[in-house]
Each structure stands twice: as structure tokens, then as C-alpha cells.
Image (cartoon, helix red, strand yellow):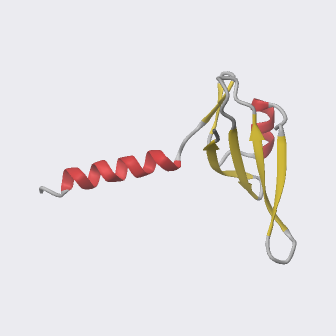
């Protein structure tokens, strides 16, 4: 019983670290969203980078979006055409 509460707190903390949505105007971008939906909500990114495997095949994209709230930008990583990671850049 004494390990139940710390285990639940750890589980909740780890799940919130992976799912960090990005705000674009009045919309939210979350992991699992399609790339065209992100472009519709946020507009065009300020930079796009192709992600390739060791054979040179494109496996995803990394895009940087300008943040409307201050100086921090968001980096969105796609595998295929779905968002797999959202990071806040400094």
C-alpha cells in the first residue's frame, strides 16, 4: 500500500511529459495529429528538415514553428505524416 501513491504519481508525471500540446491561435496540436491539420492550424513552418534513414529514404520531417507567445519556438517531429513529438525550443 505504501508504494501505491508514489507509483501513481510517477505514472501521471511521465504521461504528461510525453503529451505536451502546442497552441496555435485557438487550436491545439497534439501527438497523432496529421501534418495537413497542423499546417491548417499553425500556418507554414519557419523551417523544415527532412529526416532520412541510413539508406537515404525519407522517414519523417522536423518543422520549427514561430511561437506567438514570446521568444520560444516549437519543434514538431513527424514520422510519416503524423506528429510524434512536440518540443519547446529556447
Residue at position x 77%, y 46% from top? 63
Residue sitting farthest toward the bottom: 55
Return the residue nearer the eye: 56 or 12. 56
- For residue 29, which quarter of the picture? top right
User: Could you tell whether 69 is left or right of 56 in the image?
Assistant: left
Q: Would you place residue 25 above or below residue 80 in this image?
A: above
Q: Quadrant of the N terminus?
A: bottom left
- For residue 68, which quarter of the picture? top right
Q: Would you place residue 52 above or below residue 11 in this image?
A: below
Residue sitting farthest toward the right: 56
User: Could you tell whether 20 is left or right of 3 in the image?
Assistant: right
Please state the horizontal and vertical placement of residue 39, each as a whole percent of the image. Answer: 80, 37
Residue sitting farthest toward the left: 1
Q: Quadrant of the C terminus?
A: top right
Residue at position x 20%, y 50% from top? 5
Q: Would you place residue 11 above or below residue 59 in this image?
A: above
Return the residue nearer the eye: 88 or 27. 88
Total marks in image: 0
Please state the horizontal and vertical placement of residue 72, each as a whole percent of the image. Answer: 65, 33
Residue at position x 38%, y 47% from top? 13
Residue at position x 45%, y 45% from top? 16
Amino acid at each position: 500500500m505504501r508504494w501505491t501513491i508514489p507509483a501513481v504519481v510517477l505514472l501521471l508525471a511521465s504521461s504528461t511529459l510525453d503529451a505536451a500540446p502546442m497552441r496555435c491561435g485557438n487550436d491545439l496540436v497534439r501527438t497523432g495529429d496529421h501534418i495537413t491539420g497542423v499546417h491548417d492550424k499553425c500556418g507554414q513552418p519557419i523551417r523544415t528538415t527532412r529526416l532520412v534513414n541510413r539508406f537515404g529514404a525519407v522517414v519523417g520531417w522536423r518543422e520549427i514553428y514561430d511561437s506567438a507567445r514570446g521568444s520560444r519556438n516549437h519543434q514538431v517531429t513527424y514520422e510519416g505524416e503524423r506528429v510524434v513529438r512536440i518540443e519547446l525550443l529556447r
